[in-house]
Amino acid sequence: MAFTASDVKKLREMTGVGMMDCKKALVETNGDIDAAIAFLREKGLAAAAKKSGRIAAEGIVFADVNADGVGVIVEVNSETDFVAKNTDFQKFVEDVAGVVTNNDPDDLDSLLEMNYPGTDLTVAEVQQDKILVIGEKIGIRRFERIAEGYNVTYVHMGGNIGVLVNMDVSDNISDSETVKELGKDVAMQIAAMRPRYLNADEVDEETIEEEKRILMAQTLQEGKPEAIAEKIVAGRIKKFYEEYCLLNQAFVKESKQTVGEHIESVAKELGGTISVVRFVRYEKGEGIEKRSDNLADEVAKMVGK
């Protein structure tokens, strides 16, 4: 039975075993996925395959800027918060961030095939070893790396939320502690206020039109005449920008200014220029459907009812 590159990838996703071992297993089993899983388990490589179906929605987000100014943010998930507090797990996350920083992988697949620091193993193979040692499913979920510009990071509550802020700062003030403090303030703003966009220009037209449609329907249902409703909707769209666009948000430390106005005032005071180019905000487990077992159902299963 022939097999393809996608079969190798599928087997790796199912077992957590490295690409080369997955390919070898498929060669040995003539492309039979189930037989390949058994082959890997027999070799002791896929002892954790049974964990592949578990939900890993805990873990930590790690963010850092190295000595060369390269900013990186990664999320690695685990099944329980207990494991997220494990020092071995935390070192694994930091080492993965180091691989991203130093090797600039194109995507998650290429990251997993890169060499893990201080070993002859790939990141995927070390991840599999961690699963075997720690005893539950763990997995690298996502990462971002920004090499250019002025980068600042912030990690909240031991890794529940991580933020990477990329700024363009003029050379004459790039060494200022005030700029560093500003970056931290902006990162904390992002962590707390969850902006979706940098500014109003980043909001796509389709999103705005859909928001206007919903707001218009709501306003008309309130009994407002259409001519007045249009003005009300325009005001509410402004509120949309103020809520979801970072530079339009009220600055948490000084609510009389927007974030954009605060940045401008700091730059003016220092005699230089500062602008936020982009930001990345990761919240641990966001978007992952967490397991919620029903205790009564579990007991019923245990007693065979």
Image: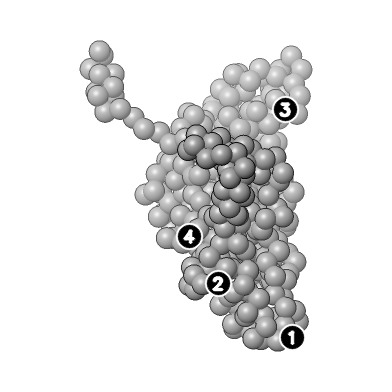
Question: SS at mark 1?
Answer: helix
Sort mark 1 into few (<14), some (14-19) or many (20+) by Cα contacts within 10 Å: few
In the image shown, does 162 or 3 lie closer to the viewer?
162
Q: Secondary structure at mark 4?
A: helix
In the rendered view, does 203 fall on the left or right side of 131?
right
User: Disc 3 or 4, which lies upstream in sequence?
Assistant: 3
> Residue at point 59% right, 19% down?
34
The residue indicated by pointer 1 is 172
Q: Residue at x 39, y 48 (%)?
A: 81
Residue holding disc 4: 192
Mark-to-mark CA distance, 2 and 4: 17 Å
Marked residue nearer the N-terminal end (2 or 3): 3
Instruction: From the top left corner, tell me how far across and down residue 84 is, in percent.
Output: 43, 51
Under circle 3, the secondary element is helix
Residue 40 placement (x, y as % from top left): 58, 28
Q: CA distance from mark 2 to mark 3?
A: 52 Å
Circle 2 is placed at which residue position?
257
Report the amino acid beneath label 1.
Asn
Q: Are marks 4 and 1 in contact (CB under 8 Å)?
A: no
Element under disc 2: strand
Mark 3: give few (<14), some (14-19) or many (20+) Cα within 10 Å. Answer: few
Asked if the residue at tag 3 contacts the one at tag 1, i.e. Cβ–Cβ closer than 8 Å, the answer is: no
Q: Residue 75 at what x, y percent from top left?
A: 55, 51
Between the C-alphas of marks 1 and 3, the distance is: 51 Å
Would you place residue 242 above or below residue 9 in this image?
A: below
Which residue is denoted by mark 3 in the rendering? 6
Q: Is residue 210 above or below residue 259?
A: above
**If you read the primary sequence from the N terminus, does the residue marked by circle 2 or circle 4 appear first?**
4
Evaluate whether residue 31 shows in this view. Answer: yes
